[in-house]
Image: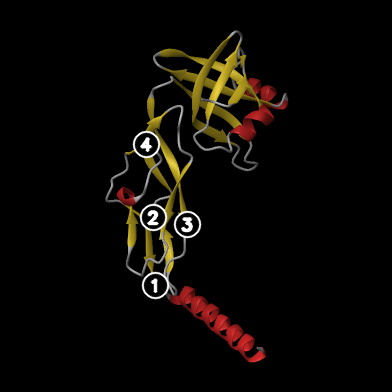
Amino acid sequence: MSDIKLAAEARTEFGKGAARRIRRENKIPAVLYGHGTDPLHITLPGHQTMLATRHSNALFTIELDDKSEMAVIKDIQRDAVRGTIEHIDLLLVKRGEKIAVDVTVNVVGESAPGTIHFVEAQTLSVEALATNLPESVDVSIEGLEAGQHVTAGEIALPEGATLLTDPDAAVVAVAEPRGEVAEEAEEGEAAEETAEAAESTEG
């Protein structure tokens, strides 16, 4: 069930000039499409929409005139310098429908001492109900040794989600640090040992 409602207005002006005027009014140009319907050009409330887009794979209820439609964001165009939202593409969805989305990989835990980890894939592709899309997945590296890795197929997905990424694809890899990274790690360990020795002496 969606808990993010946005009041939209139909858009009749197009082009760069019209888009600039819309943004000056603290609104965001958007297009709503899907299920074989003609694209519907709308404007969305600027501040409220900006806050809502911080939630990955959020489900929106777009209220326009006397109707409401459920939708998810397919694309956000941002200003390259300021990072402000310039345009949003919204995909219509229906209750009970499954769609493909990318979910963020969130690494948790600590690998074995003296090792570092590399995130090989920032996101995973999954299929899930449009009304229950996951924002992220946790990938535990707790205690993993150098040379070990976690594949997409080993990651626990939220209930109802199906993996679309190749299950054999490496998501996080653990390795021994090299070069400057190794030196920094060794210096850090030496500093910790010195601190522990000092505490022992004081005690």
- Specify the amino acid type for callout 3: Val
Q: Which residue is mark 2?
A: 120
Residue carrying label 4: 161
Where is residue 129? Give x, y as percent: 40, 29
Q: Alpha-carbon neighbours of circle 2 within 10 Å: few (<14), some, or many (≥20)?
A: some
Question: Mark 3 = which residue?
Answer: 108
Of badges 4 and 1, the one in the foreground is 4
Q: Tell me how far mark 2 sits from mark 4, CA to CA.
A: 21 Å
Front one among 73 and 87:
73
Circle nearer the N terminus (4, 3): 3
C-alpha gap between disc 2 and disc 1: 16 Å
Q: Is residue 65 above or below residue 144?
A: above
Badge 3: residue crowd in 10 Å (few <14, some 14–19, many ≥20) = few
**What amino acid type should be assigned to the residue bearing mark 2?**
Glu
| 3 and 1 marks in contact (CB < 8 Å) | no
Which residue is label 1 attached to?
176
